[in-house]
Amino acid sequence: MSARHFLSLMDCTPDELVGIIRRGVELKDLRNRGVLFEPLKGRVLGMIFEKSSTRTRLSFEAGMIQLGGQAIFLSPRDTQLGRGEPIGDCAVVMSSMLDVMMIRTYAHSNITEFAASSRVPVINGLSDDLHPCQLLADMQTFLERRGSIKGRTVAWIGDGNNMCNSYIEAAIQFDFQLRVACPEGFEPNPRFVALAGDRVQIFRDPKEAVRGAHLVSTDVWTSMGQEEETARRLKLFAPYQVNRELLDLAASDVLFMHCLPAHRGEEISLDVLDDPRAVAWDQAENRLHAQKALLEFLVETGYHPA
């Protein structure tokens, strides 16, 4: 039987995704109560990082250890990947020694190519196209605070980047309406927009996008690998800063999320993370719990979320 991969939210059914985030809530409760739960004892996670990371590395490494397994950190400069060994060849060898792989990279094709030759599950820890693990944490955070997100309205403010693309996939899978406010020329990938149909609307005015929204989310204006564009982006995106006044236009019970790291004074005002509507710290912690549920789901443990 071929391995089950998680390269995109579309790799699971809607029911499986809901089951995973609900399981994340359960695993969070177990940890908060100090209950030892080690279903992945003896299993090993390999982690390939081409991009730097704080939350992704901590959450996967700590999560695997808490589930009773171990995690190995790999960077291209420490492996033959950095010397030009074909990705498929690396996948064959690594998957013969490991139980699950997580890859954080630039080109999404690196992950799909690795997965095609891997005999163990491969997880997308972030690519230039998508960041599905972050969306699991975001959806868990909303579920804990407000219940089901089905039928709600979400506003994405800023760059139509990999996070925005994953929010589009989330709109499809979790059945909510997504409004994207971005400057012209910085729209999300048209392929994802087309897939979502009438679930996604593109706005130029962030005030229109957030009006009545139940969740508002944003990200940095300059992603890794775009540093030479910083000055231009700061000017273009200035009207898209999320601040308390903008959140006041949203629903009275709105939540504000940011996948972090945040650049205060740029995509967010200096004080918005201190606003009671902001849940970025819970959101960051939930990377740990949602990914533990994902690891449990993908690795052969006999557990199947309902």
Image (cartoon, helix red, strand yellow):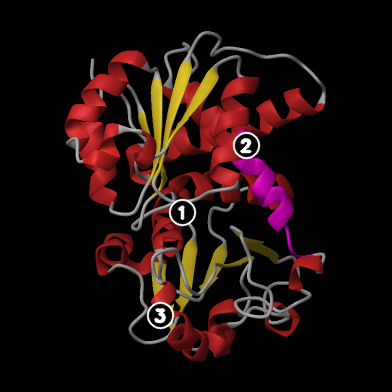
Q: Which numbered disc flags the more N-terminal residue, 2 or 3?
A: 3
Residue appearing at x 25%, y 20% in the figure: 93
Which label belongs to residue 114? none
Q: Is residue 286 above or below residue 261?
A: above
- Horizontal side, residue 23 vs residue 269: left or right: left
When asked about the image quadrant of residue 25, the answer is: top right
Amino acid at the residue labelled 3: Glu
**Residue at coordinates 38% horizontally, 18% vertically from top-left?**
98
Alpha carbons under labels 1 and 2: distance apart: 24 Å
Q: Quadrant of residue 271?
A: bottom right
Instruction: Measuring from the top left, give residue 140's x and y in whole percent.
Output: 62, 44
Residue 229: give its label.
3
Q: Which residue is mark 1?
A: 175
Alpha-carbon span between mark 1 and mark 3:
34 Å
Structural crowding at the residue carrying mark 3, measured as other residues with C-alpha within 10 Å and reported as few (<14), some (14–19) or many (≥20): few
Disc on the earlier residue, 1 or 2: 1
| N-terminal-most mark, 1 or 3 | 1
Question: In the rendered structure, which amino acid carries the disc numbered 1?
Answer: Asp
Q: Secondary structure at mark 2?
A: helix
x, y percentage for residue 149? 58, 53
> Horizontal and vertical percent for residue 259?
58, 57
In the image, is residue 148 part of the stretch drawn in magenta?
no
Name the one closer to the observer, 121 or 297: 121
State the residue position of label 2.
288
Instruction: Name the amino acid type tagged 2.
Output: Leu
Q: Range of the magenta residues?
A: 277-289
